[in-house]
Image (spheres, grey):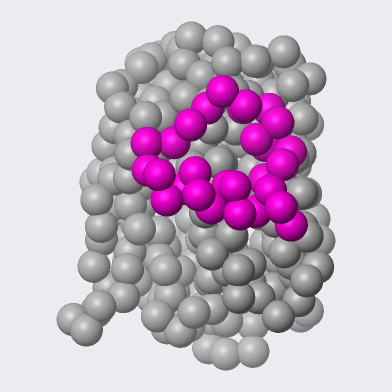
């Protein structure tokens, strides 16, 4: 087998029900020249055993074990410190890579010479028949379709809507040259780093291929399913603001405008619906402040869906 060209960083905590499928998705890659750093972040279930068994059976897997959880951002940073290949990618331990993901990422970067490539993704939703992948959502398609090679944020501002780490493969030299690290002890750590990547890249690529299936857990334990908690909302709002601040500092006005409109149309309405029945008035105040802030930046923007406009108007009074 040829030497690995890409390292996949796979952090996980208490993901035993999903870890085997995530690792199988690596084994099924059409590009075999990969290695993976599996980071057991203080799991209390069988995650560590599943990771250890994978490494014992396939030397492309390496395991790092944390006796206590350090969080997703810190775990990813630990993985970054262990990358010895030209390229790096990320896979959360409860998600699934599509079989062509690594091949498409690597061949795109080989041909373009860009700093990183971003692909499309779909949500893996629970049903009575098990987890079923959904369609590519409009905001994902807007950032990745059609394919663009050697582009920039100025030329493709809608790319700023693709803020997840696991949709991208990058040159490790790009991370090190720009001293990129994930925020630690924070949720939604992808958002800041994604905008730093877009604004600091000399060029990047986007491809419409679906590279990841992102799991929405049936037990409701995904972070995105905990937004009714005030602390989670606070971290979420901070991440939104921090990512936008990066775009502002880089004078990426078109990208910042696109990001604000996307947040208003896609992120804000679910928060307002939660807030309307939330028992804590602080939750409503925080959502109201977020809506007023983002509406102030996009005063002329009106959504196609009148229900969304009505939710904005409700929240602005909180």
The quadrant in which the C terminus is found is bottom right
Give the residue at x 67% y 37%: 294
| Picture layout, residue 68 above or below residue 134 | below
| Residue 288 point in image, percent of width and height | 72, 53
Instruction: Report the span colored magenta.
Output: 291-318
Quadrant location of residue 223?
Answer: bottom right
In the image, 131: left or right of 162?
A: left
| Residue 155 point in image, percent of width and height | 48, 9
Give the residue at x 72% y 13%: 251
Instruction: Tell me, yes or no, whether the highlighted magenta stretch contains residue 168.
Output: no
Residue 54 showing in the rendered view: no
65 or 263, nearer to the observer: 263
| Residue 304 point in image, percent of width and height | 37, 36
Quadrant location of residue 141?
Answer: top left
In the image, 45: left or right of 121?
A: right
311 or 159, nearer to the observer: 311
Prevalent SS, magenta region: helix
Instruction: Tell me, yes or no, whether the highlighted magenta stretch contains residue 299.
Output: yes
| Picture layout, residue 201 above or below residue 131 | above
In the image, 120: left or right of 222?
A: left
Give the residue at x 57% y 81%: 14
Residue 141 showing in the rendered view: yes
117 or 67, nearer to the observer: 117
| Residue 311 point in image, percent of width and height | 53, 53
View extreme (bottom): residue: 45
């Amino acid at each position: 087998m040829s030497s690995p060209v890409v390292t996949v960083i796979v952090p996980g905590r208490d993901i035993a029900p999903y870890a085997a499928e995530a690792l199988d998705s690596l084994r099924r890659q059409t590009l075999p020249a990969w290695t993976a750093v599996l980071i057991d972040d203080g799991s209390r279930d069988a995650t560590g055993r599943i990771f250890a068994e994978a490494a014992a059976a396939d030397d492309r897997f390496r395991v790092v074990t944390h006796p206590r959880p350090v969080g997703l951002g810190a775990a990813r940073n630990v993985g970054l410190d262990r990358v010895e290949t030209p390229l790096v990618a990320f896979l959360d331990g409860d998600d699934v890579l599509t079989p062509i993901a690594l091949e498409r990422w690597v061949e795109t970067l080989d041909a373009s010479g860009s700093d990183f490539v971003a692909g499309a993704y779909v949500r893996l939703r629970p049903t009575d028949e098990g987890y079923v992948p959904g369609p590519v959502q409009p905001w994902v398609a807007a950032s990745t379709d059609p394919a663009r090679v050697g582009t920039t944020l100025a030329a493709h501002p809608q790319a700023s809507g693709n803020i997840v780490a696991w949709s991208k493969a990058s040159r490790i030299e790009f991370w090190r040259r720009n001293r990129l690290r994930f925020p630690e002890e924070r949720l939604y750590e992808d958002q800041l780093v994604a905008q730093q990547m877009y604004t600091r890249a000399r060029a990047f690529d986007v491809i419409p291929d679906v590279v990841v299936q992102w799991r929405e857990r049936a037990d409701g334990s995904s972070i995105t399913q905990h937004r009714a908690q005030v602390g989670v909302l606070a971290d979420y709002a901070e991440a939104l603001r921090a990512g936008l601040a990066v775009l502002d500092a880089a004078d990426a006005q078109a990208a910042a405008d696109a990001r604000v409109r996307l947040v208003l149309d896609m992120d804000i309405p679910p928060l307002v619906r939660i807030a309307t029945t939330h028992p804590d008035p602080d939750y409503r105040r925080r959502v109201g402040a977020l809506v007023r802030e983002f509406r102030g930046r996009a005063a002329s923007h009106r959504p196609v869906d009148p229900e969304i406009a009505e939710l904005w108007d409700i929240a602005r009074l909180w």
